[in-house]
Image (tube, helix red, strand yellow):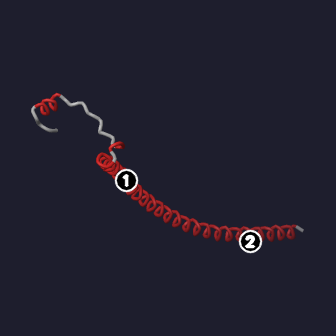
């Protein structure tokens, strides 16, 4: 009976050892799979970072171009308003808006009084 108990314990330990070895093999395979997935994700993150950097640079360039365009547009509007006012002076005097008179400085008053122009 003691031999039977020892034999049963031996078989149980062998079975437990086999189950543990199977679990270790499964976990090793899972670990390798997870390592591959992590590598793939790292590559994806690097590609995404590169894409974001390129998009940021493109947006900065487009923003600079837009600001330049808006500045040019505002300047063109001012020139058109000035030209329209000058045309109104000749063709439609009722709509002409004279430029506001400015206060002359002391030096400018002397120049004008001596017959000079500004």
Query: Would residue 72 be found to the left or right of residue 18 on screen?
Result: left
The Cα–Cα distance between marks 2 and 1, rounded to whole angstroms, is: 81 Å
Which one is nearer the viewer's eye here, 113 or 95? 95
Which one is nearer the viewer's eye here, 32 or 99? 99
- Quadrant (top left/top right/bottom left/bottom right) for the N terminus: bottom right
Which one is nearer the viewer's eye here, 23 or 13? 23
- Quadrant for residue 93, please give it: top left
- Residue 73's tag is 1
- Residue 88's tag is none
- Residue 18's tag is 2
Q: Residue 57: percent from the left, percent from the top?
A: 41, 59
Residue at the outermost left position: 114
- The residue sitting at 51% across, 67% down in the picture is 43
Q: Residue 20: percent from the left, percent from the top?
A: 72, 67
Residue 16 sits above or below residue 91 on the image: below
Are dots 2 and 1 in contact, CB under 8 Å?
no
Badge 1 density bin: few <14, some 14–19, many ≥20, Cα 10 Å = few
Residue 116 sits above or below residue 92 on the image: above
Query: Would residue 3 be found to the left or right of residue 50 on screen?
Result: right
Helix, strand, or loop for circle 1? helix
- Quadrant for residue 19, please give it: bottom right
* Of callouts 2 and 1, the N-terminal one: 2
- Quadrant (top left/top right/bottom left/bottom right) for the C terminus: top left
Which one is nearer the viewer's eye here, 98 or 78? 98
- The residue sitting at 87% across, 70% down in the picture is 4
């Amino acid at each position: 009976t003691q031999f039977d108990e020892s034999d049963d314990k031996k078989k149980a330990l062998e079975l437990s050892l086999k189950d543990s070895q199977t679990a270790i093999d499964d976990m090793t395979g899972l670990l390798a799979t997870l390592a591959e997935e992590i590598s793939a994700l790292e590559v994806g993150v690097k590609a995404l970072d590169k894409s974001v950097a390129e998009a940021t640079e493109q947006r900065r360039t487009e923003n600079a171009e837009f600001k330049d365009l808006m500045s040019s547009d505002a300047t063109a509007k001012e020139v058109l308003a000035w030209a329209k006012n000058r045309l109104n002076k000749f063709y439609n005097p009722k709509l002409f808006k004279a430029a506001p008179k400015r206060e002359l400085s002391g030096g400018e008053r002397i120049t004008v009084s001596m017959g000079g122009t500004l």
